[in-house]
Image (tube, rainbow, N blue to C red):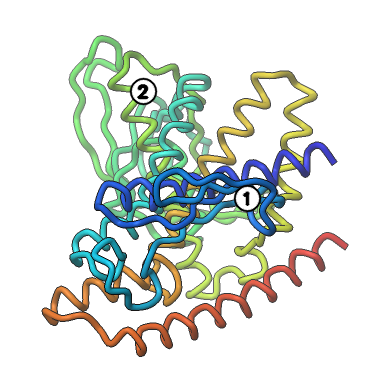
Amino acid sequence: MLNILTAILLFGFIVLIHEFGHFLLAKLNGICVVEFSVGMGPRLLSFTRGETKYSLKCLPFGGSCMMLGEDSENPDPRAFAGKTALARFLVIAAGPVFNFILAFLFALIIVAQVGHDSPVLHGVADGSPAQEAGLMAGDKILRINNRKVTAYRDVILYTFVHPGEQVTIQYSRPLDGSRENGSAAKRHTAVITPEYNSESQSYMLGVSFGGYQPVHGILELLRYGAYEVKYCITSTFDSIGMMLRKKISVDDAVTGPVGIVSMVGETVEQGRQEGARAVLLVVSQWILLLSSSLGIMNLLPIPALDGGRLLFILIELVRGKPMDPEKEGMVHLAGMMFLMALMVLVLFNDIRRLF
């Protein structure tokens, strides 16, 4: 039960940060925030400061930021709808942006603790496609099919998403056989077709990497922290692409709140058995993944989501005048109905998987 509560609070914290982004940019742009809530459902307590009611609600997840004139016309000069398109764009975009900022902060914790996974080859299997293409231990993978490689996870992700497809590998090899002290290296290119491995049930190049390396200095920490967020974004879009190409089923790729809470609870319990550092890393990894995912999904141009609202503002900027509020409201209502139906389906699949 404690692990489930931890998972719920974790997810709620991520949603709360999202809503705080809307709240902060609304205040900075002179928009009246009617109510800012921590939690959902009936109010437990509240107080009013200035024009805003601050509420604590009984369900310990999420939050909300209710702005004046957000969904209807209002003559008040501090109403959301009365502000410039740029101001409204910044307020709506702030939610996802704050999710990415939160993900980045916890990515820094992860990188500081475990380092980064270097794309330098530790070994090449005998008779493997990589060996036949001329790759050797000590080579550093730079690109795979023109996708930049920062960590060896990029190579693993690409071969997983494009199973069995021929790839062009760009790599560098030290001229003196050593990568110490920034020695000179020459670039090479190899064309490789991964082979299916029945033991791992996946297509493999036949290479191994040397594991995680410590970061050196604040700039390297920031660089690899940003990479962790980028990797989450890339893997999310790759998963969507696999669903569209029918490489994986929607059931396998999409997990709803029930499934997420269950997985978070299980991994937190495993971390508790290994100590406080393991719990910190597990929690940080989940915040990184969930906050990045929430930011991405909210930016998709789907009505009722932040991305859908941003799309209408962009259309307004192109047209030079706003869309008809009534028609826009109908589109967002239809989007909300679609999302609710999708959520019911996802919850059903979550529960079915649990039992």
Q: In which quarter of the image is the C terminus?
A: bottom right
Query: Mark 2: which secondary structure?
Result: helix
Q: Residue at x 62, y 50 (%)?
A: 39
x, y (%) of residue 83?
22, 65
Q: In this view, does 42 lie to the left or right of 126?
A: right
**Closer to the camera in the image, 329 or 312:** 329
Q: Is residue 336 left or right of residue 83?
A: right
What residue is disc 1 on?
39
User: Quick one: label 2 or label 1, which is nearer the N terminus?
Assistant: 1
Residue 352, placed above or below residue 159: below
* Residue closest to the far left: 320
Q: Which residue is drawn at 51% across and 26% down?
A: 211
Q: Is residue 334 left or right of residue 271?
A: left
**Closer to the camera in the image, 272 or 116:** 272
What residue is disc 2 on?
221
Quadrant of res 102: top left
Residue 21, placed above or below residue 87: above
Label 2 or label 1, whichever lies nearer to me, is 1
Query: Mark 1: which secondary structure?
Result: strand
Quadrant of res 148: top left
